[in-house]
Image (cartoon, rainbow, N blue to C red):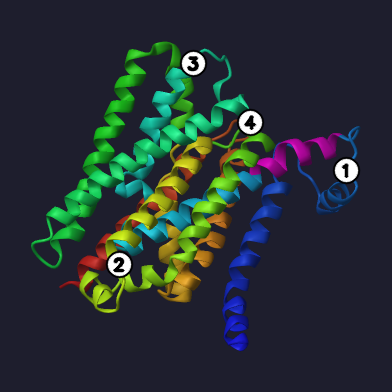
């Protein structure tokens, strides 16, 4: 048993190494480059009078840590959605959880519009998380109900899942656009937030969001065995004694909570929850006990790298990180569609 656990840890080491490299690159690159010697020195001996120490502790570290947590959270949520719906094309964006969370958070932004700097007020972040969670839970619930009601054939529910998720994503996106159109004074704030960004985030956001991501992600990891059984189908899972309805609800709520927390601080970032679990599944296999931590590590690393590119490619200007992940993920999504189509011929 101990040798098997060591073997599993060794299989995760390359992904952990990738995340470490991504973090170091994210801290190193920027408008002011920090050498690795300066990073090491200011990590162990920070000085309040040092400009490099200020950049490291107040700008770079909070940003890369939050990006890693959001990337890991979206990847874990994506793995959970894929396991529950038995579809490798499912992710928080495609299923509609991200756009549902965006709608809920947008409504919260309007309700909290009395503050000039909405997202910088620490006490408002919990309200954004709660509103995003309710919006995401509503959309995912509707998608799940539609997929369950359409279970007339073997492949119908999976196809309906994707179509229903995309339809509801378009509908909630249209509602967000309508809200922006009717509230011109909030247009810039909502629009910049929807594109996805980690700019201006500090330790306050980390202290509020990371516990939610860790709790929901940890709960999903504890559900690894039920996820393995659900991947074989409801009939097989029921035969093996799994209460499919109860565990499916728990996993969906945890994945939705994780997605909502990520969206509340970063905006809508698509396709990462699709790419990371699928790539990890190719490298480590389909067992969720290894897939979920592997997806977390890979998703965190990919998000840090995407955010680093977003703030350095056209510096001093900054590209919203949601644009970068969409440019990375859309070709990958199309590749998955084509490959799955060829496999079914």
Residue to which mark 4 is pinned: 200
- Real-space Cα separation, disc 4 to disc 2, in angstroms: 44 Å
- Whether residue 306 is visible to the viewer of this picture, yes or no, is no
Residue in view at x 38 percent, y 42 percent: 98
Within-10-Å neighbours for mark 3: few <14, some 14–19, many 20+: some
**177 on left or right of 292:** left
Number of the front mark, 3 or 1 = 3
**How many labels were placed on the picture?**
4
Q: Main secondary structure of the magenta part?
A: helix
Helix, strand or loop status at disc 2: loop
Circles 3 and 4: CB atoms closer than 8 Å:
no
Residue to which mark 3 is pinned: 113
In primary-sequence order, the first of circles 4 and 2 is 4
Is 56 contained in the magenta span?
yes
- Real-space Cα separation, disc 1 to disc 2, in angstroms: 52 Å
Residue to which mark 2 is pinned: 243
**Magenta part of the protein: which range?**
51-63
- Real-space Cα separation, disc 3 to disc 1, in angstroms: 37 Å
Residue to which mark 1 is pinned: 46
Q: Quadrant of residue 103?
A: top left
Residue in view at x 48 percent, y 75 percent: 284
């Amino acid at each position: 048993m101990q040798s098997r656990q060591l073997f599993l840890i060794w299989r995760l080491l390359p992904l952990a190494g990738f995340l470490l490299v991504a973090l170091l690159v994210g801290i190193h690159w920027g408008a002011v480059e920090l050498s690795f010697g300066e990073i090491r020195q200011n990590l162990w001996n920070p000085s309040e009078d040092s400009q490099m120490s200020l950049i490291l502790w107040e700008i770079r570290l909070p940003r890369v840590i939050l990006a890693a947590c959001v990337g890991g959270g979206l990847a874990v949520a994506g793995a959970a959605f894929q396991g529950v719906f038995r579809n490798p094309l499912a992710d928080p964006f495609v299923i509609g959880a991200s756009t549902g969370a965006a709608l809920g958070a947008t409504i919260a932004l309007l309700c909290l519009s009395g503050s000039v700097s909405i997202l910088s007020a620490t006490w408002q972040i919990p309200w954004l998380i709660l509103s995003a969670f309710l919006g995401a839970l509503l959309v995912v619930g509707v998608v799940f109900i539609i997929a369950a009601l359409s279970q007339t054939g073997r492949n119908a529910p999976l196809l309906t899942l994707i179509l229903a998720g995309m339809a509801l994503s378009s509908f909630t996106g249209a509602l967000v656009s309508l809200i922006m159109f009717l509230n011109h004074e909030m247009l810039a704030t909502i629009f910049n937030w929807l594109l996805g960004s980690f700019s201006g985030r500090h330790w306050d956001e980390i202290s509020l969001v990371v516990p939610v991501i860790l709790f929901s992600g940890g709960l999903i990891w504890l559900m690894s065995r039920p996820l393995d059984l659900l991947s074989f189908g409801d009939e097989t899972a029921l035969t093996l004694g799994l209460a499919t309805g109860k565990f499916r609800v728990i996993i969906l709520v945890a994945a939705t909570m994780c997605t909502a927390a990520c969206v509340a601080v970063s905006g809508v970032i698509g396709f990462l929850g699709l790419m990371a679990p699928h790539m990890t599944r190719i490298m480590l296999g389909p067992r969720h006990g290894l897939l979920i931590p592997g997806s977390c590590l890979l998703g965190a690393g990919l998000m840090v790298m995407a955010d680093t590119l977003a703030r350095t490619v056209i510096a001093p200007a900054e590209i919203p990180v949601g644009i970068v992940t969409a440019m990375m993920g859309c070709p990958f999504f199309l590749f998955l569609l084509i490959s799955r189509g060829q496999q079914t011929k």
